[in-house]
Amino acid sequence: MKSVSEYEVAAGFLDSGRVLANAAHAAGAVAAIACLSRPHGLERLAIVASLLCWPVSCYFALRVAIDASLFRALAGDSEDGASHLDELLVRMRLRRRVVERSPMDRVNGALRLWRCQIVMLALQISPLILGLAMRLSVSGD
């Protein structure tokens, strides 16, 4: 039976970032449509706050997706695959310098980005729900 590496396990969690990204895109689209309906006061503030969170959510989604694909590649590679990856990223000018990190350091860093993506989605959806609820309570009166 093949043993599972830290990279494979992390890639599995990071893959859920696509679902989070889709939820952020849906929330962004709803916020954009809600902005077109000319909201007022606190309702507008809540909807705009949600809309402003969307690019940050996209940033975290991109970083998480990159890490998932890199981890999947590292999972099938030899022990020195991570150091080769670091050297390649420096040559491609995507990193400034090579910093020695253990597999768990890399995994913990990627999972930190994944958690940031989750928090950012919550920060995006919360004001949107609040703004839409205010909209419904005003139109229902």
Image (cartoon, rainbow, N blue to C red):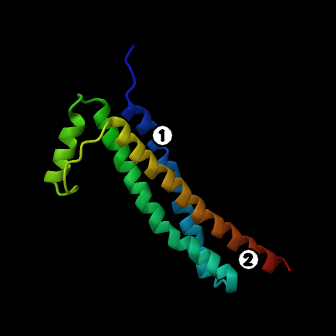
What amino acid does circle 1 point to?
Phe
Vertical placement of 70 versus 22: above or below?
A: above
What amino acid does circle 2 point to?
Arg
Q: Quadrant of residue 43?
A: bottom right
- Image position, residue 84 (x, y; %): 18, 39
* SS at badge 2: helix
Q: For the view shown, which residue lies furthest in the top direction?
A: 1
Q: CA distance from mark 2 to mark 1?
A: 36 Å
Q: For the view shown, which residue lies furthest in the right direction?
A: 141
Residue 14 located left or right of residue 86: right
Res. 21 in view: no
Q: Around disc 1, counting alpha carbons within 10 Å, would you say few (fewer than 14), some (14 to 19), or many (20 or more)? A: some
Residue 90: image tag:
none
Location of mark 2 (residue): 135
Location of mark 1 (residue): 13
Q: Around disc 2, counting alpha carbons within 10 Å, would you say few (fewer than 14), some (14 to 19), or many (20 or more)? A: some
- Image position, residue 30 (x, y; %): 59, 68
Res. 51 in view: yes
Vertical placement of 30 versus 91: above or below?
A: below
- Image position, residue 99 (x, y; %): 23, 47
* SS at badge 1: helix
Identify the residue at image location x=42%, y=37%: 10
Vertical placement of 104 versus 29: above or below?
A: above
Q: Earlier in the sequence, mark 2 or mark 1?
A: 1
Identify the residue at image location x=69%, y=82%: 42
Q: For the view shown, which residue lies furthest in the left direction?
A: 91
Q: Nearer the viewer, mark 2 or mark 1?
A: 1
Identify the residue at image location x=86%, y=80%: 141
Residue 85 located left or right of residue 35: left
Identify the residue at image location x=43%, y=55%: 61
Residue 49 located left or right of residue 111: right
